[in-house]
Amino acid sequence: MMRPVRTAAAAASASVLAFSLAACGSEANSGVISNDIVVGLLLPDREAARYEKFDRPVIEDKVSRLTIGEGKVVYANANQDAALQALQVENMIRDEVDVLILDAVDAKAIAGSVAKAEKAGIPVVAFDRLAEGPIDAYTSFDNEDVGHVQGKALLKALGDKAKGGRIVMVNGALTDPNAALFKKGAHAELDGKVTVGKEYDTDEWSPKNAEANMKAAIEELGGAAAIDGVYSANDGMAGGVIAALKAAGVTELPPVTGQDAELAAVQRIVSGEQYMSVYKPYAPEAAAAAEMAVALAKGESLTTVAQTHVDSPTTKDIPSVLVPVIALTQANIEETVIRDGIYTADEICTGKYAAACAELAIG
């Protein structure tokens, strides 16, 4: 889906940007006369460490490389406030950015702001969450597969208890379309194999809300001993789930899933408190967003960037890049987050985690 753009560099180049997950894309000059473009980057919150630690720096670096240092990124974080994010989009439209990279707080509510950007001739790349409205491109992970990976891992951890065992499901926020896909994938693996004793959709993906949900589940199911495992859709909420279990006096924790490979979660995996997380290689996802944004700002085709097309509730056939995910357990910490430079062994194996790291031969 291409449309006119305002920037002076909007004429299509004879060559287009090449993208590969392995190399994170070509960074050669595309031949466009001017690389002086402005990319508006809108991220949803600071609860998940990934946005500030990984996504923003990768996008800023990639935009700089693709524009030979002439392009720039202007940044805003909505702190989980959908109304604030709508205002941030309007401010960037007013400031005449050339393209937006948008990770929506509320994918449905932001549709009107996306339409305003379209009217102003500003393309929008949906990042990580598929916002509604006239989106031009999308990059994320295979979100339904995330749920499949989590569900399979939980069944593996349950072992013999998987047959007829009882679990609690702590899903993400209803405002996030990804949460529905995670849940769908997880249910496809778990339904008919375990009993879901209680299930929650957690407002704002909040660890505190997840802790409250888990506390309620423990009370309603007759105590923590009645719970064989917990499906938690992400790592922050897994921390809340584990806190609730500990507060209930549990010393031998049931397997708990997660997602995002946050440092605290990796440390909990090392210590055995959390069974697994989903490692999502952020660099390829963020690099793809930057590459599509720069191409759109220059009026170039996304043919060589997009690997597939997806539909949102409002827009069909959106050029997309979907990055594969990996189940992260004690067995592959070295081969994933350490090898990829997400964390060092020293960052993971601090203080009380040093002995567990030594036992796992990490470091």
Image (tube, rainbow, N blue to C red):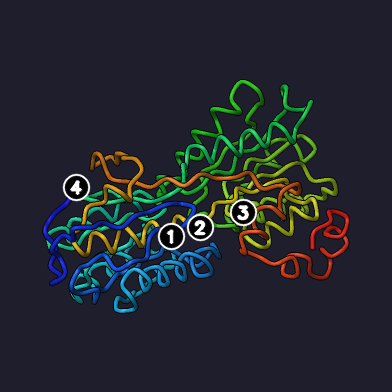
Q: Which residue is mark 2?
A: 282
Q: Image point 69% across, 52% down: which residue?
A: 335
Question: Which disc number belongs to residue 286?
Answer: 1
Q: Image point 30% across, 69% down: which residue?
A: 40
Taking 46 as reference, is 304 left or right?
left
Does label 4 or label 2 sit earlier along the sequence?
Answer: 4
Residue 132 rendering spot, x and y as whole percentages: 28, 48
Does label 3 or label 1 sit earlier along the sequence?
Answer: 3
Q: Which residue is mark 3?
A: 235
State the CA–CA distance, disc 3 to disc 1.
Answer: 20 Å
Q: Which residue is mark 4?
A: 1
Does label 1 or label 4 sit earlier along the sequence?
Answer: 4
**Mark closer to the observer (3, 1):** 1
Q: Image point 36% across, 62% down: which residue?
A: 290
The quarter of the rendered structure image containing the C terminus is bottom right
Q: Amino acid at mark 1?
A: Ala
Taking 146 as reference, is 300 left or right?
left
**Mark closer to the observer (4, 3):** 4
State the CA–CA distance, disc 4 to disc 3.
Answer: 35 Å
The answer to whether mark 3 and mark 1 are in CB contact below 8 A is no
Q: Residues within 10 Å of mark 1 (few under 14, many from 20)?
A: many
Q: Secondary structure at mark 1?
A: helix
